[in-house]
Amino acid sequence: MGWLFLKVLLAGMTFSGLLYPLLDLSISGKTRAPKPNIVIILADDMGWGDLGANWAETKDTTNLDKMASEGMRNPERDCYTDVALPLYENLNIVEQPVNLSGLARKYLEKAVAFIEQASTSGRPFLLYMGLAHMHVPLSVTPPLENPGSQRPYRASLQEMDSLVGQIKDKVDHMAKENTLLWITGDNGPWAQKCELAGSVGPFFGLWQTHQGGSSAKQTTWEGGHRVPALAYWPGRVPANATSTALLSMLDIFPTAIALAGASLPPNRNFDGLDVSEVLFGRSQVGHRVLFHPNSGAAGEYGGLQTVRLDHHKAFYITGGAKACDGSTGPEQLHASPLIFNLEDDAAEAAPLQRGSPEYQAVLPKVTRVLADVLQDIADDNSSRADYSQDPSVTPCCSPSQIACRCQTV
């Protein structure tokens, strides 16, 4: 999960050091519509099946389910990216070591106070909250109902649901007509934690689990990166809607930029899309192609060896993360990739037969799009992925602090 962040941009949204202005003046002097407020809530290790609106077996997300009925659900959302570290607010350490038992309350108090302050300022705002939930339960959470039947993960899920519900209530009270509330997660559940982990829903990754290991977090199987996603904005996002557009975490940035009336730098390529038309119910067009970087279970970290093209998905490498029973799946390279039809096989149980007409039709297409993206990366001189670590920027490395973790690189 990494560091715990309580991120609040107190001065409003910032672009290259400039405050996010309320109105955009055109050359003619006419004013455009006020720019919206944006609230982004990112849950940690929340499984696709942890949202009741996605998975009927889940009964612990009444507030999120209500939001789904009042907004848009996107079940095709793709995302990536033990805690004894400081609590951050922007770049400042506000508590070290963090008191996990009171963390949810701190998030809620700060968020509610910020929304109230920002709403009365007359200026649009951005609030980003990177939650400690769900991960695994990080403290003893008092059960909210039926204490005799709840396991810790359910209690923690209810706590997160309550937290988000109270933030939504504050948005509804202060700035309902002009605020986009967007909730999603970073990746799938941490399966090796057994009953302390969430649910992948129907995305079992059965081919991999039969080989060994988990197909959830740290893998490129659907359970590893398909996450819940909800958008809420009364009057703009249609109520009780489900979008089938294939979206990605990469879309949040360009969408927020567009809604704020700003422009992306023209000298580089951005993999994300402005999906505001999808959110507003005017389009079902998202990505045709997504790439799933290796995330720790197999291959070089960050390497691109799994590609999604429409409803087909090709694996040039497979491997299982550590499962609940401690097993891991072997790393296997596939010169002729495993290709799954996710429309017919959401559980990724049986790859297409290599000699089948469907496989033969899809193979040259995925080969071409993979070659194209690798060439695009090779030609990109303005940005790069850097997975190295620098101990000089480790915020919590003090041998005298038993709650700090010092890692040598």
Image (cartoon, grey):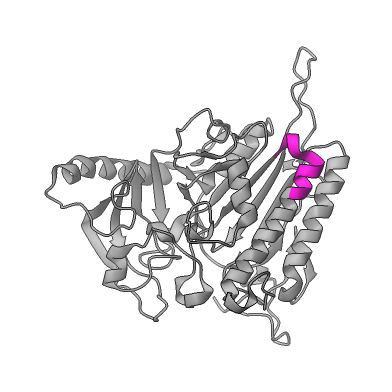
**Residue 409 pos. (x, y %):** 54, 75
- Which residue occupies the foreground of this view, 71 or 308? 71
Query: Image quadrant for the N terminus?
Result: bottom right
**Residue 372 pos. (x, y %):** 34, 41
Q: Residue furthest top?
A: 28
- Residue found at x 39% / y 64%: 300
Residue 12 in view of the camera: no
Q: Where is 138 relative to 78, above or below?
A: below
**Residue 327 pos. (x, y %):** 36, 79
- Residue found at x 53% / y 56%: 52
Q: Where is 169 relative to 91, above or below?
A: above
Judged left or right of residue 219, residue 332 is left
**Residue 217 pos. (x, y %):** 46, 65
- Residue found at x 73% / y 69%: 103
Residue 113 in view of the camera: yes
Q: Residue furthest left?
A: 355
Q: Where is 342 relative to 191, above or below?
A: above
Q: Please count the marks in the image.
A: 0
The answer to if 59 sits in the magenta stretch is no
- Which residue occupies the foreground of this view, 175 or 307? 175
Residues rendered magenta in the picture:
169-179
Q: Magenta-highlighted stretch: main secondary structure? A: helix
Judged left or right of residue 262, residue 124 is right
